[in-house]
Each structure stands twice: as structure tokens, then as C-alpha cells.
Amino acid sequence: MTFADKLVKMGACREAVHWVRKNKYGLKRAWANCPERIWISWLLNAMVGKTGWPTEARVNLVGDRAIGEWRAAYRKTLNFYEADKAEMKYLRAHIRLGKV
């Protein structure tokens, strides 16, 4: 059974399974190259308390970091969206005035 098959059996998201399968990664290589920290957080939470995996306290620490990074990325995206919205308003006004 491949790591991707194990992820399917555990209920991992489709995107994570596809990425692991496409790259033919096992656990170690997937862990080292994972593009989404939330996937790592999910895996840690799924494995908490199992032999060789961290305790719940350690998982929460990693999860908090992942959530913090997600929030920062969301804020940055929102800032870009707001800037685009203002630019579009500016362009629409100029189009109406025949300046573009």
C-alpha cells in the first residue's frame, strides 16, 4: 500500500492525495516537500497519540503556527483584492468618461 493509498483510507483531502500520488512520495519525502502546512497539521491531528507520533500538545503548537500562517496569507490576499477593487473602480470611471 502506497502512502497515497493510506491517505485515502485516512480520509485526506483530494488535493493532498493527488499531490502525493503525482510525485510518488512516501511519508518522509511528502513531509519534507509539502506545499501546504495545513496538510501537515491535518496529518499530525489524524495520527496524534499513535506510536511514534507527537502528543496532542505538540500537535496543537504546530496547528497554531499553520493557522497563523494561513491567516497571514488570507490577509495578504484580501489586501490584493481590495487594491484590485479600487483599481477597477478607477478604470470604470475613466471608461465612462471616455479616457480609456
Image (cartoon, helix red, strand yellow):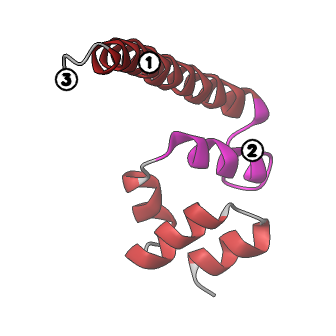
Query: What residue type is disc 1 on?
Result: Lys
38 to the left or right of 75: right
Quarter of the image where one finds residue 93: top left
Disc 1: CA contacts within 10 A as few (<14), some (14-19) or many (>=20): few
Residue 85 numbered tag: 1
Q: Position of residue 38 (x, y in %)?
A: 59, 41
Secondary structure beneath dot 1 equals helix
Quickly name the residue at label 2.
Answer: 45
Q: Quadrant of the N terminus?
A: bottom right
Q: Residue at x 50, y 24 (%)?
A: 69
Q: CA distance from mark 2 to mark 1?
A: 38 Å
> Dot 3, how many residues are within 10 Å of its Cα: few (below 14), some (14-19), or many (20+)?
few
Q: Nearer the viewer, mark 2 or mark 3?
A: 3
Q: In the rendered structure, does residue 96 fall within the stretch colored magenta?
A: no
Query: Does residue 5 lie above or below 92 as drawn?
Result: below
Residue beneath the point at 71% across and 27% down: 60
Q: Nearer the viewer, residue 52 or 72?
A: 72
Q: Which residue is mark 3?
A: 100
Taking the image as shown, residue 49 lies to the left or right of residue 73, namely: right
Contact check, label 2 and label 3, Cβ < 8 Å? no
In terms of depth relative to the viewer, which is nearer, 64 or 51?
64
